[in-house]
Image (tube, rainbow, N blue to C red):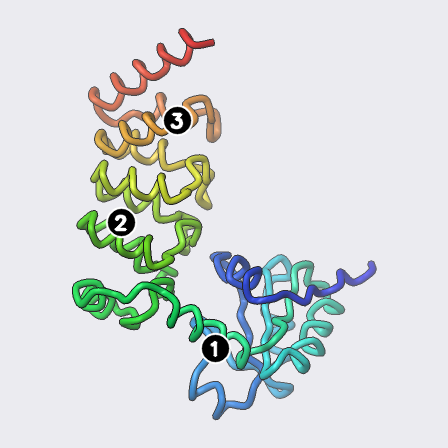
Amino acid sequence: MNAVPFRRIGFDIARDVLGKPDILLLDVRDPASFERGHIARAENASPINLGRFLTETPKEKPVLIYCYHGNSSQAYAKAFSESGFGEVYSLDGGYEGWATANARAAAAAPRLSETLKAFLIAQGFPPDDVNAVGKNQMTPLMQAAHLGPAALVAELLAAGARVDAMNSDGSQPLWLACVGDDPEIVALVIKAGADLEHKNVNGSTALMYAASASKAKALMALLEAGADLTYENDGFSALDMAGSRECLDLLRAAQRRLKAAS
């Protein structure tokens, strides 16, 4: 079987790739450079331990590799491609370009309030990175969407926090906003461009979660935004999953409106 060629990508595409919950991120610089600074979740690879990554990593797992400037990473990416990996990327510009681009973006970004900085530190994130990734691949926006208040969520969104980031369950910030059941926060995340129909690793949407968990306020905000009532996961719709009479009534009313409009 022919090897699938690896892709050389820039920083914008790399940020999307890094949002994949099962990404293997390899830093192929020397250990001292790695210790001084590296992209979150990266593992240090070298010719010495490369064989372990090649043999122990599932072939369907996406792999992103970076070096100093984007040259050496291509050789490593080629090795993964030739070993049967189907989704392999080499970062053009390497860590040096990545760090420079992030520094410029940080300089251009709105200044973070002391309240937000304190929140980031309390949640285990760097005080200046609104798109940092923590335990279970949770981001600051996910935490704030869950915990509130709405003003904190609004500031994160204004500072460039991503609404399409995914945690280890494949859930995006909109899902966490539904957990918090604050309709103002749900509306803020939706307005920022959240995908209403995004499905987590189990194939469920935020609407299904809100219905099954009896998050009536979040459910109403999702319905008002036009979330799909008809989607089914294993033969069950959000209506079938309603966990409370209030949620059931909201879903039935929305279904009646949908039928009347068709």
Residues at badges 3 and 1 in contact (C-beta under 8 Å)? Answer: no
Between the residue at mark 3 and the residue at mark 1, the CA separation in whole angstroms equals 39 Å
In percent of the image, x 41 and y 56: which residue is there? 168
- Comparing 73 with 238, the one in front is 73
Task: Identify whether 34 is placed above or below 201.
Answer: below
Kindly state the secondary structure of the residue where label 3 is placed: loop
SS label for mark 2: helix
Of the image marks 1 and 2, the number of the one nearer the N terminus: 1
Q: Residues within 10 Å of mark 1 (few under 14, many from 20)?
A: some
Identity of the residue furthest to the right in this view: 2
Q: Secondary structure at mark 1?
A: helix
* Residue annotated with mark 2: 145
On the rendered structure, is 55 left or right of 223? right
Inter-mark Cα distance, 1 to 2: 28 Å
- Residue, far bottom: 32
Classed neighbour count for the residue bearing mark 3: other residues with Cα under 10 Å, few (<14), some (14–19), many (≥20): few
Cα distance in 3D space between marks 2 and 3: 20 Å
Residue under pointer 3: 226
At label 1, which amino acid type do we have? Ala
5 is higher (above) or lower (below) than 256: below
Residue 99's disc is 1
User: Which amino acid is tagged 3?
Assistant: Gly
Q: Residue 45, image x and y in percent?
A: 57, 81
